[in-house]
Image (cartoon, grey):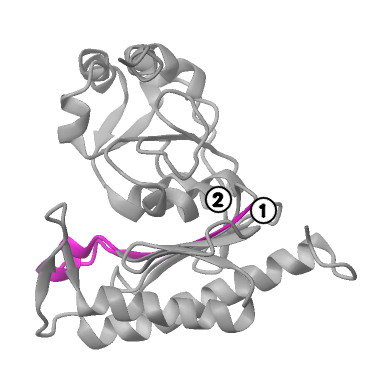
Amino acid sequence: MFKQGETVAEDLSRYLETAIEAARAAETVINRYYHGDFEVERKADASPVTIADVECERTIKRVLAEAFPDHGFYGEELGRESIDADYVWLIDPIDGTKSFVRGYPFFSTQIALMHQGELIVGVSNAPAFGNGDMAYAARGQGAFLNGERIHVSTIDEIAETSLSTGNIGALGASPAWPKIGELVGDVHRIRGYGDFYHYHLLASGAIDAVIESDLNILDIAALTVIVREAGGDVTELGGGPIDLESRTALATNGRVRAPLAPYLAAWNEAEHAPRD
């Protein structure tokens, strides 16, 4: 529960301000390493990790832990700590390490706060993208991009929808692929912006839906809060809620969710099929 003597809004504002401070601290670390020389190691799943990833996460945790010593953490590089706490910070210090290593700016720092299973704060900072691209939100307080209030679009028809897809290889191997292929032909425009960027575009009304698979909660926790506070919605592809075990995402402006549903019925059926 929130502390006595403080309002929910005051608590959320404090959590958000501290998350932004942590993201800016990580940005300083990123700027020190980006385009520099550093060793790249491989994790068990063959994905890359660098000293910048680890140092960023330590920096983020230090800022958050100093402000909220009773909170738990779930980080991409440093794992879980006090995961049963009422408040748990979800951290991906450099989401898009492959881009970071190759020297192009499609990577971001993702920081979210979960309270008893509910995502309540999100910060998504892409420091090398343009002049920097920071989106942030707290429950009930709206969503912002580079300091400006943002909202999803009002598009409500498939024929007018701009759709972005992520991790197309995993989508192609799914039972829903034939219908997704139909969807590609029916929407107004199809793109694959990927990572943080298509969620920033969705939340600011530039596109209308995102379909993505083969991800984890650390990739989308902060972005989920931002899209929802911009007026959109985010679920798993099969319609289930976003939680610690989520591996897919369907994010929309809310208005095109119902028209999209028939195209994803096969995915929904596969996700809910009995398991051996």
Q: Which residue does the image show at 22% across and 40% down from the upper left?
A: 167
**Which image quarter: residue 126?**
bottom left
Q: Label 1, on which residue?
A: 139
Give the percent coordinates (x, y) of residue 202: 44, 44
Badge 2 amino acid? Val
Along the viewing direction, whichever of 40 and 206 lies nearer the viewer: 40
Span shown in magenta: 95-115
Q: Which residue does the image show at 46% across and 45% down from the upper left?
A: 244
Q: Label 2, on which residue?
A: 225
Say whether residue 69 is visible: yes
Q: Is residue 239 above or below residue 270?
A: below
Q: Quadrant of the N terminus?
A: bottom right
Tally of numbered discs: 2
Say whether residue 144 is visible: no
Give the percent coordinates (x, y) of residue 88: 56, 60
Measure how far apart labels 2 and 1 are at the Cα level.
Answer: 7 Å
Is 155 within the magenta? no
Give the percent coordinates (x, y) of residue 67: 62, 81
Left or right of 248 on screen, residue 182: left
Left or right of 28 on screen, residue 96: left
Along the viewing direction, whichever of 107 and 163 lies nearer the viewer: 107
Q: Is residue 178 above or below residue 135?
A: above
Q: Which residue does the image show at 16% across and 24% down from the upper left?
A: 173
Q: Are marks 2 and 1 in contact (CB under 8 Å)?
A: yes
Q: Residues within 10 Å of mark 1 (few under 14, many from 20)?
A: many
Q: Which residue does the image show at 21% across and 79% down from the upper left?
A: 51
Badge 1 amino acid? Arg
Q: Which mark is residue 6?
A: none
- Is tag 2's residue or tag 1's residue first in the polypeptide sequence? 1
Q: Determine the secondary structure under disc 2.
A: helix
Q: Residues within 10 Å of mark 2 (few under 14, many from 20)?
A: many
Is 113 within the magenta? yes
